[in-house]
Amino acid sequence: MNLLLIENNPEFSSVFEPYFHEYGHTVVTVFSAQDAALAVASWRPDAILIGCPHPGLRQAISGIKLEPALGSLPLIVLSCNPDDRQDGAAAFIDKSALLSDMEKQILKAAGVRA
């Protein structure tokens, strides 16, 4: 699998890269969402990994989603901190996907679009 790693800390990327290589993955590491957009001009990843903490995580993920070459790719937030994972999910997941069917029905009955 071709993995695009967005990691602004070279020490962390030096830990992640060998781990993914060991399991047979090809890894290209960049340091920002802007660099990621440039990298895919010449190389097509299968998934994007973003290391946390990452300054401006929500903005970086929003920028990735807007890039035609990146927006449809799976994006995985790498963090031990639950708040980072939650921020990543909040920036990436369609909020209507988080609602139960019952909640969607209630909102629909109230005239609110989920």
Image (tube, rainbow, N blue to C red):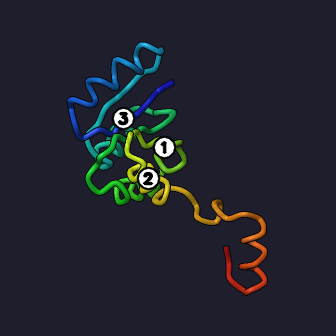
Q: Which residue is under mark 2?
A: 88
Q: Which residue is under mark 1?
A: 75
Q: Secondary structure at mark 2?
A: helix
Foreground residue, 108 or 82?
A: 82
Rendering quarter of residue 98: bottom right
The x, y position of residue 99, in whole percent, is 67, 65
Rendering quarter of residue 38: top left
The x, y position of residue 41, in whole percent, is 38, 39
Q: Which residue is under mark 3?
A: 5
Q: Earlier in the sequence, mark 2 or mark 3?
A: 3
Q: CA distance from mark 2 to mark 3?
A: 15 Å
Q: Earlier in the sequence, mark 1 or mark 3?
A: 3
Q: How many other residues sit within 10 Å of disc 1, few (<14), some (14-19) or many (≥20)?
A: many
The x, y position of residue 59, in whole percent, is 35, 60
- Tell which tag, 2 or 3, sits nearer the viewer: 2
Amino acid, disc 3: Leu
Residue at the location (49% across, 54% down)? 89
